[in-house]
Amino acid sequence: MHDFTILIASGGFASAVATTLDLLATAAFMAPRVGVSKPTWRVLSLSTGPTVLSGGFSLDAKPLTPRTKPDSSIWVVPGLATQSTTSTDARLLQPDALLAIRALKAQAAAGGTVAASCSAVFLLQAAGLLQSRKATTTWWLAPHLQSREPRCEVDANRLVVCDRKIWTAGAAFAQTDLMLQLLRVRCGAELADAVSRVLLIDGREAQAPYIVPTMLANGNALIANLSQHIEAALPHTPSVGEMAAGLCISERTLTRRVRAATGKSTSALIQFVRLKRARLLLETSRMSVEQVAEQVGYRDSTALRRLMRKMLAATPRQFRPVNS
């Protein structure tokens, strides 16, 4: 019996698929050296014939069929490489996606473990597997996932989330982090750590450092304007009430519109903009941390350090150039 079943879809991220297979191959190579059994896996395509991935890469694999039965392996789906909320919704209606949705639902119903990263997390949602669970996905699609499944607690800051045998991961390259976690669960920490060292994979905990507030809104003009307004006002931080008054709407309406666009509160948007500016200053200037904190509206550096640890899983020092 296999340890992992990798489902690949036409148009999916070639990098995520390649990373998955290279990581598993490295694990098989390292297993005897750390004294554990080699992991085994199979690759199933959601279509017949060669599966063409992003960038024109193709891979031959045995097709998933309606007769494919659930098993004890961990089923993993790398990202689908959709580029908008509209294309993500449309992708879920295609025949190969519907086949995957049914198979993932059956695997979970049989008590099996399923995992997906990036936009492939929407396959799990469409299969009804995210209800009353915690999950993550690529950060710019997180608000859309939340709107499709209001009963799911979507945390865009997290890189990998596990909730009762349902694993989800963030943007495309979070597939690496997902596979390391799954290796740890299935084959042990020693093998996962060995693979991480051999492939020079640094431990990461969050995708929050990569979030761009305006992109989080998927082109929403209100969020773009608010982000620009907040940044232009620094070091003075506008209050939610001031921003609402500037738009001639109530705080409640502003909060509702911001949450609908980003999946986050207006206060969280303000903090993201402040942290984005702070990170830029740390990376490009010789300002002290205290001076940076002052430039983004904090009275002292303690508050900035605390917020960076909470939202970025990092310290100000980590954003300094290596030679500074």
Image (cartoon, rainbow, N blue to C red):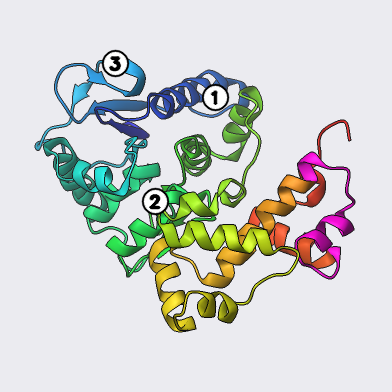
Residue indicated by mark 2: 141
Q: Which residues are magenta?
A: 282-301
**Foreground label between 1 and 3:** 3
Which numbered disc, 1 or 2, marks the residue that appears first in the sequence?
1
Within 10 Å of the Cα at label 2, are there few (<14), some (14-19), or many (20+) other Cα atoms? many
Q: Is residue 287 magenta?
A: yes
What type is the residue that disc 3 sits on? Answer: Ser
Q: Nearer the viewer, residue 202 or 57?
A: 57
Which numbered disc, 1 or 3, marks the residue that appears first in the sequence?
1
Which numbered disc, 2 or 3, marks the residue that appears first in the sequence?
3
Q: Secondary structure at mark 2?
A: helix
Q: Nearer the viewer, residue 284 or 196?
A: 284
Within 10 Å of the Cα at label 3, are there few (<14), some (14-19), or many (20+) other Cα atoms? some
Within 10 Å of the Cα at label 1, are there few (<14), some (14-19), or many (20+) other Cα atoms? many
**Foreground label between 2 and 3:** 2
What type is the residue that disc 2 sits on? Answer: Leu
Q: Is residue 292 left or right of residue 162?
A: right
Q: Where does the image place residue 117, in percent across and percent down from the top left?
A: 40, 42
Circles 1 and 3 in contact, beta carbons < 8 Å: no
Q: Where does the image place residue 82, in percent across and percent down from the top left?
A: 32, 38
Residue at figure coordinates x 14%, y 22% from the top left: 48
Q: Nearer the viewer, residue 285 or 146?
A: 285
Disc 1 to disc 2, C-alpha distance: 36 Å
Q: Which of the 4 image quarters holds residue 323?
A: top right
Residue indicated by mark 1: 31
